[in-house]
């Protein structure tokens, strides 16, 4: 009988495992190796699309694992009818009064060159970022009062707006914690650990046994979460992959998993 999975790690990408500016994870290599050694699956959980996440999984050498895409609206193996969600979102946006619609520049309003410009991604990666099925990230250029009216008008149509590290992302309401629950029911781990840097990670951090808020100096700090009082959720001092690395290694040690070996590999 296969031994139970000790630990499953759920991680946001931008500003968490990936550096906010360079998208590099090299500072997290020691912790990534430790997770591989003990056989702890790393579940990427991001506002990115399925195409983007599959590419990053390949680069990390973790292809084939489940992943949470587009802020929890779906898992990596997308539903065949998923594109309907995106088309419906774009339709709802375009039905808004002009003064509310105009300050929101969604990925669907941009060409790949513009997405590349605002994200720093290559043109090819920017095209993958535009290949959306469930959610619409965008930039808000209006004032805070109009932004609140925009969010209220969308909410009346069943559309929710979540703030990530960089973008305001619209969807039909799923969170990363919804995707997480599906993965947990598949893998049945003894412990769960989640890492994130932004408000759209809050539900995931709260749902995990251990949550880590990774410092992101490029954005306002995440408001305090209830789990921080009892130390279920901690904050890193160091930003991005550097903070990620230190936090994961510390938690493996705390759980006495750092000396464990993957039971499925000699
Ligand atoms: Mg992030």
Image: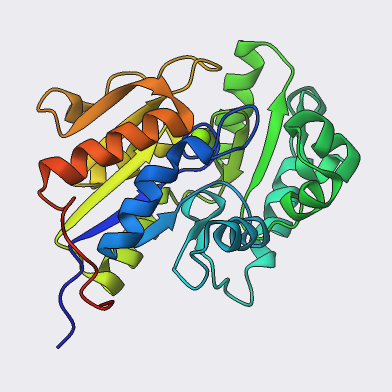
Q: Quick one: which residue is furthest to the front in this view?
A: 266
Q: Is residue 24 above or below residue 221?
A: below
Q: Quadrant of the C terminus?
A: bottom left
Name which quarter of the figure residue 20 lies in: top right
x, y percentage for residue 107?
Answer: 77, 42
Q: Is residue 137 above or below residue 3?
A: above
x, y percentage for residue 109?
Answer: 84, 40
x, y percentage for residue 105?
Answer: 78, 32
Question: Residue at 81% across / 43% down in the picture?
Answer: 122
Can the viewer see residue 40 in this picture?
Answer: no
Q: Answer with left or right where residue 236 lies relative to residue 51.
A: left
Name which quarter of the figure residue 29 lies in: top left
Q: Is residue 8 above or below residue 248?
A: below
Can the viewer see residue 147 in this picture?
Answer: yes
x, y percentage for residue 141?
Answer: 74, 18
Q: Answer with left or right where residue 50 lies relative to residue 199.
A: right
Question: Residue at 63% across / 20% down in the picture?
Answer: 147
Question: Residue at 14% across / 88% down in the picture?
Answer: 1
Name which quarter of the figure residue 148 lies in: top right
């Amino acid at each position: 009988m296969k031994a139970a999975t000790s630990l499953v790690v759920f991680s946001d990408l931008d500003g968490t495992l990936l550096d906010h500016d360079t998208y590099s994870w090299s500072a997290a290599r020691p912790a990534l190796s430790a997770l591989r050694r003990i056989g702890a699956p790393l579940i990427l959980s991001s506002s990115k699309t399925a195409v983007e996440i599959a590419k990053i999984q390949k680069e990390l050498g973790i292809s084939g694992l489940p992943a949470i895409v587009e802020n929890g609206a779906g898992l990596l193996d997308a539903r065949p009818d998923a594109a309907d969600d995106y088309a419906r979102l774009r339709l709802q946006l375009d039905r808004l009064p002009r003064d509310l619609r105009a300050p929101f520049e969604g990925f669907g309003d941009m060409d790949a060159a513009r997405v590349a410009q605002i994200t720093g991604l290559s043109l090819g990666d920017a095209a993958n970022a535009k290949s959306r099925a469930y959610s619409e990230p965008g930039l808000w250029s209006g004032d805070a009062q109009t932004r609140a009216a925009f969010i209220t008008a969308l909410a009346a149509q069943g559309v929710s707006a979540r703030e990530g590290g960089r973008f305001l992302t619209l969807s039909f309401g799923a969170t990363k914690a919804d995707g997480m629950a599906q993965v947990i029911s598949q893998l049945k781990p003894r412990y769960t650990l989640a890492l994130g840097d932004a408000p759209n990670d809050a539900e995931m951090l709260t749902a995990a046994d251990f949550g880590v808020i990774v410092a992101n100096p490029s954005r306002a700090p995440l408001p305090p979460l209830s789990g921080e009082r009892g130390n279920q959720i901690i904050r890193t001092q160091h930003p991005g992959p550097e903070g990620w690395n230190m936090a994961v290694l510390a938690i493996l040690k705390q759980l006495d998993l750092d000396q464990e070996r993957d039971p499925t590999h000699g």
